[in-house]
Amino acid sequence: MTPTIERDEREYDVVVIGAGGAGIRAAIEAKMQGARTALVCKSLFGKAHTVMAEGGIAAALRNVWKEDGWDVHFRDTMRGGKLLNSWRMAQLHAQEAPERVLELEEWGAMFDRTPDGLILQRDFGGHRYARPAHVGDRTGLEMIRTLQHKAVELGIDVLMECTITKLLLDDGHPSGAFGYWRQSGRFILIRAKAIVLATGGAGKAWRITSNSWEYTGDGMAMALESGADLVDMEFVQFHPTGMVWPASVRGVLVTEGVRGDGGTLKNSRGERFMFRYIPEFFKAETADNEAEADGWYENKKDNRRTPDLLPRDEVARAINAEVKAGRGSPHGGVFLDIASRRTPGFIQSRLPSMYHQFKELADIDITTEAMEVGPTCHYFMGGVRVDPETEASTVAGIFAAGEVAGGMHGANRLGGNSLSDLLVFGRRAGLGAALYAAGQRAPGAVDEHEVEEAARRMVAPLERGASLTGAPTPEAEDPYRIHSDLQTTMQDLVGIIRTGSELEEAVRRIGALRERLDRVAVKGGRRYNPGWNLALDLRSLLTVAEAVTRAAAMRTESRGGHTRDDFPNPDAQWATRNVIVRMRDRQLALATEPLAAPPPELQRILSGEPAKTEPAIESTVPTPAGGFR
């Protein structure tokens, strides 16, 4: 059929959508396998959200603690995820993370060093041993710099400021991706044999978030619309330490590395309140009192944890409880103090970004004053359901890696595991996509009617805006107002603490916002029009927000990053069940499915036994047989 929509056209074997750590690593692997590869950036190359991951890359390198190993890392990850993780993903991650970190070092990453020249590792919440490898508190930035240089060296085509809005299929297989150039508004069609989604999460659905503007759930929404499954969408992580003041920077991340390097949380009375919130699950390896915790920081003769470094869900709930009890800081958070525990020189050398961040944004010198911090929407544990070996989704030829993919982290992610997740599963996704593409003669056929419909939907807000003479009316909605109302809904009703009635109200409001979106009107043209860009992002934001809310309503218990005030305890019936979200006839459909139990050897590791053998790391993964298996 003759094209009816004016557009740019490209053709590749593999197109990777999203240029954070997972996306670049996937593109590198696909290219190294000989696939013609394109890397699509919604923003500028190198400005991915990965650069905001500050603390470290979790990997059992054993440079600080020889007692560490993949088995301990696996156990920590599973326990942090409340055993709801995909055990195979957690196993592969723990086994392969050291190799991926060393590979990054070979490609030029400049890590901090131990006195004998090895990669230095620091303490992080939920990790039994000092595990995350780091570059001060700028680890994500160094990762992106290194991967970016490798991608350029390999000659990967990079399409910057390009937003993909729809995946195209032919008989259930990828034929390409359709979207637009943000600068010009011109449409682009990228034909491809295989597609890797690496678009991150959807934190911009909440008002207080550490996420940047790109995080609007594009990949999750496109995967749903293409027939793929989402899993664990109810589990959204609220990082316990984001800035709370001034209001203009509320939610900006304060790295867990502050607590990993000795920082402590205190309430308005000066109490280290975390000692009141140690769950039974962690008491056996957590300091019992403040003096013991101080001793651990000073000599580290044992491996017991200070409660300031409990997993993030535990700490976030504790801070929320202190604020609600009237023991919060003046601006609605708590205090994070490292000034009384470390020298100014130590703080400025180990936490240079945090020092400058508070100095420039809040006029606070963290070498002499405590920081005010509070929970901020940070990370999606849920996402596209994938095969652990290849990262293939339930739609043949579509792969996913990084935060857009679910399963690895279960009910809660440990700090530092996101960056190693990007490397391990970014590589596997790129390899899986390249092998899949090698088995296809050409991209599938493009349905011009489908492209035309997608284009019409994209320009509709501009066509409605062309008739406006003043401000938008109820018949012509403003995208910024819809976005603000969505953020208020999710912040107030689908936050850290949830109830059934509030979740029902949130579903109702999201439905009303979707109706308003059909009337959104934007003035101007397609060139440099942020209002139009937001109007297009809202469709994904609303889809993902509804998936989170409905999944949270279905899970009638509290577990990890999902807390129900009306069901405050874990329920054994939910301990081994995932909530699955699908799209049927353009409506979300939810179901529960049993979670596969780990094999006996991993069960023994979870109970505390060491692994009997070191892992044999495979350099390749099996050729995918066509979709999830």
Image (tube, rainbow, N blue to C red):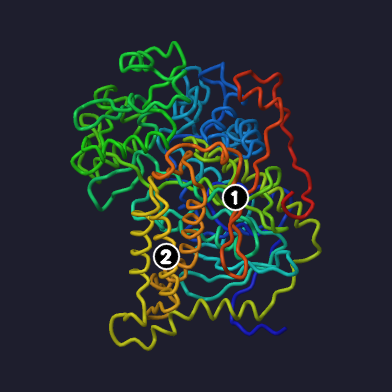
Q: Which quarter of the rendering shows the N terminus?
A: bottom right
The residue at 26%/26% (across/down) is: 344
Is 148 or 412 nearer to us in this picture? 412
- State left or right for residue 514 relative to residue 168: left
Residue 590 % position (x, y): 58, 57
Is 262 or 594 nearer to us in this picture? 594
Secondary structure beneath label 2: helix
Query: Which residue, given by chain and number where applicable, does mark 2 sit on?
Result: 508
Residue 348 % position (x, y): 31, 30
Residue 148 seen in the figure: no
Secondary structure beneath label 1: helix
Q: Residues within 10 Å of mark 1 (few under 14, many from 20)?
A: some
Residue 464 seen in the figure: yes
Query: Which residue, given by chain and number where applicable, does mark 1 sit on?
Result: 151
Q: Which mark is residue 471?
A: none
**In the depicted structure, whether residue 317 falls above or below residue 186:** above
